Image (cartoon, coloured by chain):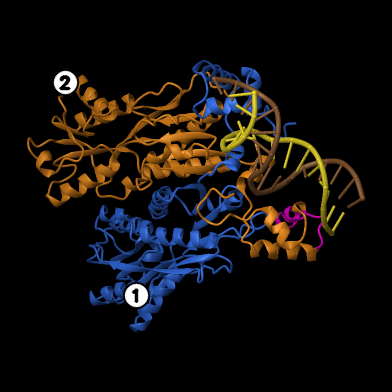
Chain colours: A orange, B blue, C brown, D yellow
Amino acid sequence: MNRNAGPARATIVDVARAAGVSRQTVTRAVNDMPGISPATRERVLAAAREVNYHPSRFGRGLVKPSARTLGLVVGDLTNPYYADLAATVLRLAAVRGWNVVMAEPGSVADLVGAADAVVGFTGLALEPPGAGAPNLPVVEIDPPRVHPGHGRIEFERRTATGDAVRHLLGRGARRPLVLDLPGGSSRGAAFVDAFAAAGVDAVVVDRDAGWADLSPGAPDALVAFNDLGGFRLLRDLDAHGVRVPQDVRVVGVDGLALGEFVTPRLSTLAIDLAEVARAALDLVVQLSEGSADDPVRVVPHRFIARESS
Amino acid sequence: MNRNAGPARATIVDVARAAGVSRQTVTRAVNDMPGISPATRERVLAAAREVNYHPSRFGRGLVKPSARTLGLVVGDLTNPYYADLAATVLRLAAVRGWNVVMAEPGSVADLVGAADAVVGFTGLALEPPGAGAPNLPVVEIDPPRVHPGHGRIEFERRTATGDAVRHLLGRGARRPLVLDLPGGSSRGAAFVDAFAAAGVDAVVVDRDAGWADLSPGAPDALVAFNDLGGFRLLRDLDAHGVRVPQDVRVVGVDGLALGEFVTPRLSTLAIDLAEVARAALDLVVQLSEGSADDPVRVVPHRFIARESS
DNA sequence: CTGAAAGCGCTTACAG
DNA sequence: CTGAAAGCGCTTACAG
């Protein structure tokens, strides 16, 4: 009967039996429809409460038009970068009448069967959903690896990175240090290339490098892996008595609004997350309709110079 | 036929017809099940692609055991306070095999039919879901108003507020200014009461008060409405050359991790959001099972003294 | 390896 | 105002 562990969940039939009415009368009571006497309605609702009845989303969804559901996979909501994107996606999705089911990168598979389309923004390459999800439209935002069947929002970094590097060089920086992922990343590479183009060699270290790795050679410019890393950097430099920007210039990446609240305010490569969210939603909708000619959209970064550089 | 605007969505029957097989053969191909020849599988998958077939979540959910879905309504993901809670809920829900569908406060109604239970954390009172959602278990976190049928996670502020006030008084503060919501709030009231208990009158102003409202009378302690407000305050004070904590002491509320990164680091009333998330999930599960004797849980704040006070 | 039948829980016409 | 029938899209036994 009941494949689950717990007690069988009450269905409309259980309520009908408990109230001594038919199934459609239960529907009428529960959905507040006309054509039912107040007395019957009360009796049915009481019975529903009695048997702890919750209507099945599936039975209902099968038979009446329901909101489509977007699966949203973000890297870490604790990072305002991802949280801001999620906030925008939520807003846009609500406007378009979609629901949004969220998951962590590890749980993408759980989304199959829960979502009609998926948008991923994780810093990693989303593994394809696999069996049971044929033609599931997937859009990845700024993925490190291109995945064939998936749509993609690409970040254009070159221009803004060039702006940032020119800005740093213009202020006299000559010994830049780039903090990057252990394996390297496109954002780190973009900085190294831009410095190289100006004849300056940038040193690359692990983004989790501690003070011991940062101080030797006295870099005069630090490129953090992201703004959160930049915040940490500012704190550590302050703790060691290093003045920013006098002793060393610091630049972050992401464009977090909170960069305005740290001291000194953090210069950063910003991206318009609202635009990213909009592009991702548009694209995923097109993919669901099977009408995306070229499933790639490009959104540019721009450099925001603040006090830290 | 088709109640929606767009073209009718392809079903398993359409694929079966296109591939010249039966429905169950389509199921086998699509779900990567055994008992089907590779050739047939390929042909079916091609047909599925052809007609742009996506399996219906509802048809499938009706017939096989699926993850339950938690509706999570948060105030504003842009505020790390809410984002941190959401992150924890996501993690815990994944562990327990729940999906999480998120919505903004305005769209709670959209969650009906999408969620099996709802947790709300909005700073507002959640309006009850209404028709079509009998017995929908709802848990509200720190709601301003108590709602009968709903479960509740309450924040215990009195103790920590007392600690903060004693701390401020101990450092010589005598003219506290409390920034509160226009209509007042329990967190503001808790501070006013605690000061009053020590014989000190706190002035209350709108949390969006500008500099003109803050400077007169030269308060020597500012209680921000939340940490984000505290960050803004620190920035404004700095801009006006007011030194913190020498000239004025500042305390926030929420316990954001980012308070460690502003200058000076912000003292705050912190709450363990992981504990809050856990309590909310436990309670909502109990409510779904109809087994919550007393649907209220209490989680305490604690005062964290940092540089700003 | 493939297909005909039954049924998941619900709502929507249609009768009475 | 109330109920019997049909069907939403899918999977699960069961036959062949």
Residue under pointer 2: A199
Q: Is residue A64 visible?
A: no
Residue A233 in magenta stretch: no
- Residue at left 31%, top 45%? A259
Residue B198 position within the rendered picture, expressed as x and y whole percent measured from the top left: 33, 83
- Give left or right: position of A121 versus B12: left
Residue B226's disc number = none
Whether labels 1 and 2 share one chain: no
Residue A207 position within the rendered picture, expressed as x and y whole percent measured from the top left: 21, 38
Residue stretch in magenta: A25-37
> What is the chain letter for disc 2?
A
User: Which one is in front, B164 or B210?
Assistant: B164
User: Which one is in front, B232 or B116?
Assistant: B116
- Please tell me whether residue A74 is drawn above or below residue A202 in the rendered image: below
The quadrant in which the C terminus of chain B is found is bottom left
> What is the chain letter for disc 1?
B
Q: Could you say whether the residue bearing mark 1 is in a helix, strand or loop?
A: helix
Quarter occupied by residue C1: top right
Residue A110 position within the rendered picture, expressed as x and y whole percent measured from the top left: 46, 40
Task: Identify residue type, mark 1.
Answer: Thr
Q: Is residue A48 visible?
A: yes
- Please tell me whether residue B98 is drawn above or below residue A178 in the rendered image: below
Residue under pointer 1: B159
Measured in 3D between alpha carbons, the distance from the residue under mark 1 to the one under mark 2, in whole angstroms, is 60 Å
- Residue at left 29%, top 56%? B259
Residue A34 in magenta stretch: yes
User: Which is more foreground, mark 1 or mark 2?
Assistant: 1
Q: Could you say whether the residue bearing mark 2 is in a helix, strand or loop?
A: loop
